[in-house]
Image (spheres, rainbow, N blue to C red):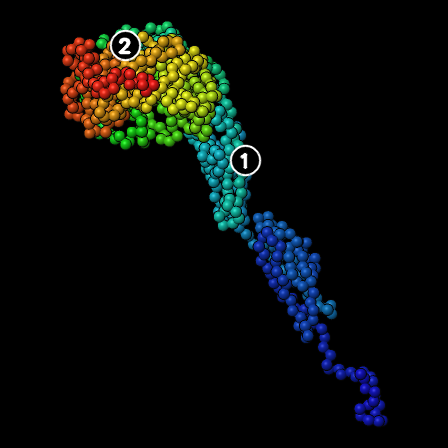
Amino acid sequence: NPLTTDQRGVGFNRISGTVDIGAFEFPNSPPDLQPQSFNAAENQTQIGTIQATDPDLPNEMLTFSLTGNGDDASLFSLSSAGVLTFLAAPDFENPADSDQDNIYEVEVLVSDQYGEMATALIPVTVTDVNEAPSIALQPVLSTIAEDVDTSSAIKIADILITDDQLGSETLSLTGNDANLFEVVGTELFLKAGAVLDFETNPALDVTVQVDDLTVGMTPDDTDSLTVLITDANEAPTITLTNVTSTLLESIDTTNRIVVETFTINDDALGSNNLSLSGDDAALFEIVGSGLFLKAGVQLNASLNPVLNVTISVDDPSLGMGAEDSAAESIEIIVPTVNLLPEYSSIIGFVNGNFWITRPSSTTLSGFQTSVAARTSFTAAEITTSVQGDFNGDGLEDVAVWLTNGEWHVGLSNTNRELEFSLWTTWRTYDVKEINVGDFNGDGLDDIAALFKAEEQANLWVFESTGTQFLPDLYGRYTGYDKILATLVGNFDGQYGDDLVIHNNSGAWWVATSDIAGTEATFSLWFRRSSDVNRSISHYQVGDFNDDGLPDVLALYDVAGSTTNFDVMVGLSTGSSFDQTSWFRMTVSQNLNAFVVGDFNGDGRTDIAALLNNRRWWVGLSNGLDEFQWSSWGVWNFAAGIQTVVVGDTNGDGRADILGRDASNYWWSAESNGVEFTTRQIVQWSSTAAWSNIHVGRFTSFGLIGSADSLIQDQSPVVKSAGTTGASPAQAESVADQILDAATFELFGASELLELLYGM
């Protein structure tokens, strides 16, 4: 608050006025704006702050502005605080200053609060920055014919690169067809030698990339190009598959026989004319994509041992004649002549070797054994083995599937040997139901199997050429895990062998081979839903009514019984199975073996069962609907039965039964049409572990030399007429005495004993 009294006391008077002190007054100075310049990088607006000072004390507030002078004043902005910027980011490569030298000039004014001012011309130099490059393709070709000559590279486009002079550019190619292109300098070329194909790749796609590793992304820019391929009429080519190299002279030519299939490889232009030439062209015909031996052709190996034919393809619009051809030679094979009846031989494997046992003379005085093949594999390496005539010479061969997937085939020769070689290789998992048959009807046995493909079963047939197996997918069956059994035979009486599949729903499906021998048609031949709950075993194939069509047979259990079995026969009609029970068999103790064969030589297939490890019962087919059951003989071996196989050991054309006991003695129950006479035929080494046993016609009959060291001397327990010179009646008497004596003494007739047990 102001004082209300004079502090000096009473009587003091206050005087007011202005005093001029003169010498203490100073004039105001203008701001100091020194010459200055700036550098600014391109592609951005920032420049810097103008520097100015005020010489007056105290310093006065300075304000900055543009005068509008300077060649490039319109390109700048200046804040009152002196911050100078470009209105738009400059481009070093495209300068916008008045003389286009990237030095921009602007006049700046600075003033103080009393109106004093100063000006200066400020130069701003724009500097270059390494920028990411860009790319553009300028095509010179957008289409190209597929048959163009590509022996030299063909220019496709120019490559335009936009960039500064800093850094470096790297070009590269990507895209589905980048491997067909190349960059030369700044040009894009189709490579020399590039293969063009309208049918498989009608448009070539390529992308050119540019990249400066020091800036931007990788790549910095791309441009793509598509070159269209125009179709041209190309020369067709022909490829042969499923080629048959041999035919049996005796093959049935009532129907035409496929000898090869072929594929024409061509575009959709022009046309393809097929023709046959060669010495034997008249014997062949083309049907669809197959080459066939004509129906009714008579083959004669003596007059014409090799058939030569060439199949050619021609596109007339090309005017060159036949553009491609493929020749085939087919050898006509005469099976080994066997004037004597066909005797069975036995094949077995032990210690890395296959051995063969066969009749030793025309008088059947005994069987002898020798090494058939010394192999490089062991028993543990064999997954399975099968037999068949794989080269069509009339002798059966042996095929071995190893654990590594390889199939080795041992071809039989007349020297009692098996000559092994590698024929094909399979995968080793999810494969079942391996079967042998002539599925393409060329006279050579093939191997078929079901390969799992998810839930399906792919039927692959590996067709024999006589020297190798070639794979052919015949068809697909739904339900790999539902398959119970498969059987092989020419069930429809046409073309090649067929495959029967019996599944767990009671259905019998048949895959019938086609005339070309390249695929199969699946169809349902029989189904009985009540069979689903029945136990089914001992599947067999035979011609039970002698009509020329193979039939199927199996044992079905009987509900509520543990000893009865229905012998169910499905007679083939050519398109279905007529299945009925032909016999109800009672088994009191054990069913040790069940086999089929023509035991009385009437042309109809019969059945035989070994019951209780002792007695053979035979059911002779009546050709209609019944097996006539009776006892045919007794096997009474101290050692149990290990192997039971049907063959013909005496060459009379009637089926016999061969058995191997635990001591490796081989026995034969030889049929005379009404009963079996049993004799011992040979003993294999009793200490060896035999495996992969097969019985068949592996060699032509004739004299052979002495047995090998693994074979013990023949010591028949039951002597046949052939071994002693006795009459058949005497031999049978000896057999009865030896085999039945003990049973007869204790219980009476063995036949009565069997009847007491329900047989």
Quadrant holding the C terminus? top left
- Residue type, numbered disc 1: Gln
Which residue occupies the foreground of this view, 454 or 598? Answer: 598
Task: Please state if 6 lies on the left or on the right of 213 as rendered.
Answer: right
Rendering quarter of residue 745: top left
Residue matched to label 2: 673
Image coords of residue 185 (percent x, y): 47, 39
Which residue occupies the foreground of this view, 382 or 127? Answer: 382
Q: Which residue is drawn at 50% across and 23% down?
A: 231
Above or below 498: residue 35: below
- Residue type, numbered disc 2: Gly
User: If you read the primary sequence from the N terminus, does the residue marked by circle 2 or circle 1 appear first?
Assistant: 1
Secondary-structure class at tag 2: loop
Mark 1, Cα crowd under 10 Å, few <14 / some 14-19 / many 20+, is: some
Rendering quarter of residue 381: top left
Above or below 213: residue 331: above
Task: Please state if 96 lies on the left or on the right of 315 as rendered.
Answer: right
Mark 2 or 1: in front is 2
Which residue occupies the foreground of this view, 138 or 522? Answer: 522
Q: Can residue 296 be seen in this view?
A: yes
Q: Which residue is drawn at 54% across and 35% down?
A: 138
Task: Please state if 720 lies on the left or on the right of 20 as rendered.
Answer: left
Above or below 382: residue 1: below
Rendering quarter of residue 497: top left
Mark 2, Cα crowd under 10 Å, few <14 / some 14-19 / many 20+, is: some
Residue matched to label 1: 138
As drawn, the residue found furthest toward the bottom would be: 10
Image coords of residue 731 (percent x, y): 18, 12
